[in-house]
Amino acid sequence: MIPNVLTIAGSDPSGGAGIQADLKAFSALGAYGMAALTALTAQNTRAVTGIHPVPPDFIAAQIDAIFADVRVDALKIGMVGVSEAVAAVAERLAAHRAKRVVLDPVMVAKSGDRLLDENAVMAVRERLVPLAELITPNLPEAGVLLDRPAPEAPEAMREAARALHALGPRLVLLKGGHLAGTESFDLLYDGDDYVELPARRIATRNTHGTGCTLSAAIAALLPRHGNPAVAVAEAKTYVTAAIAAADRLSVGHGHGPVHHFHALWPAPPAA
């Protein structure tokens, strides 16, 4: 059976991140994608120039409309925004007993700027994190969630993963891309065991939407795999290949998108 997967996130009109990236990842991995919008943004590969939040009651209405009609096999939560929107999402997902929830706590921009105020961060920490089967923070987002400096070394990542797990999710995938070095690794923690997922760094500037794409890929694959660790490993392999193929695209003049359909589209002819 083809899984139905919902993304609850903001829109990126340039197509590289947000719900556009999520729907591409769902499709590339054989899932039927659905979307409830939390915000409209004006952005491209170089900058975000405007954000127009969707009213919380309309976010709730979108979620209710989906669950009233469609079997939802998994869902991904990305950018939510203000604390009222976080509360609306949490209330509706609890009411519908949503399962296989993957939370990408989008809190820090690539520039390092905080995207959420403290009330919204607290709402994410207290309302959404406990609903999640899996959360996928990067190191700066882990610091924000834990209200401490971001971890900067592998042992600090392990301690942060333990602290994040104590907030209530079933699993934590702590992404180590901000660590220095020629290789990076992500750390998967289930409350008992750690699994290190290494990856080589790929020389490309086209990494826009990698976090969105990874969390969406995990959500797409969870219904197919009974073991979340298998879904995470397969999703990471997919995203790594999408980054490696990113330079086959020519999109914008800043940080371009990854190639979500690298395995499906024909390679361009050699120059």
Image: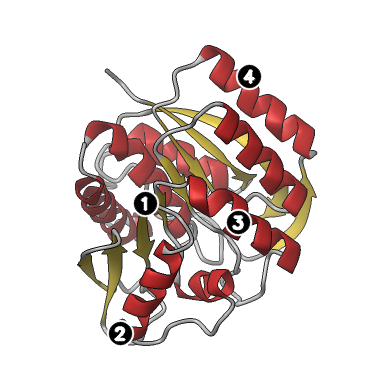
Secondary structure of the residue carrying numbered label 2: helix
Secondary structure of the residue carrying numbered label 1: loop
Among the two numbered marks 3 and 4 on one chain, the one whose residue lies closer to the N terminus = 4
Q: How many marks?
A: 4
Q: Nearer the viewer, mark 4 or mark 2?
A: 2
Mark 2 → mark 1, Cα distance in angstroms: 21 Å
Q: Nearer the viewer, mark 4 or mark 1?
A: 1
Secondary structure of the residue carrying numbered label 3: helix
- Where is residue 248 shown, x and y percent of the image? 34, 55
- The image quadrant of residue 151 is bottom left
Mark 4 → mark 2, Cα distance in angstroms: 44 Å
Q: Residue at x 56, y 49 (%)?
A: 128
Mark 3 → mark 4, Cα distance in angstroms: 25 Å
Q: Quadrant of the N terminus?
A: top left
- Where is residue 108 shown, x and y percent of the image? 60, 69
> Mark 3 belongs to which amino acid?
Glu
- The image quadrant of residue 100 is top left
Residue bearing mark 2: 155
Q: Residue at x 45, y 25 (%)?
A: 72
Q: Quadrant of the C terminus?
A: bottom left
The crowding category of the residue bearing disc 2, from other C-alpha atoms within 10 Å (few below 14, some 14 to 19, many at least 20), is: few
> Mark 4 belongs to which amino acid?
Ala
User: Disc number at residue 170?
Assistant: 1
User: Disc number at residue 126?
Assistant: 3
- The image quadrant of residue 200 is bottom left
Residue 43, relative to residue 27: is it above or below? below
Compared across the picture, whether 198 is left or right of 41 comes to: left
Among the two numbered marks 4 and 1 on one chain, the one whose residue lies closer to the N terminus = 4
Residue bearing mark 4: 65
Among the two numbered marks 3 and 1 on one chain, the one whose residue lies closer to the N terminus = 3
- Viewer-nearest residue: 78 or 191: 191
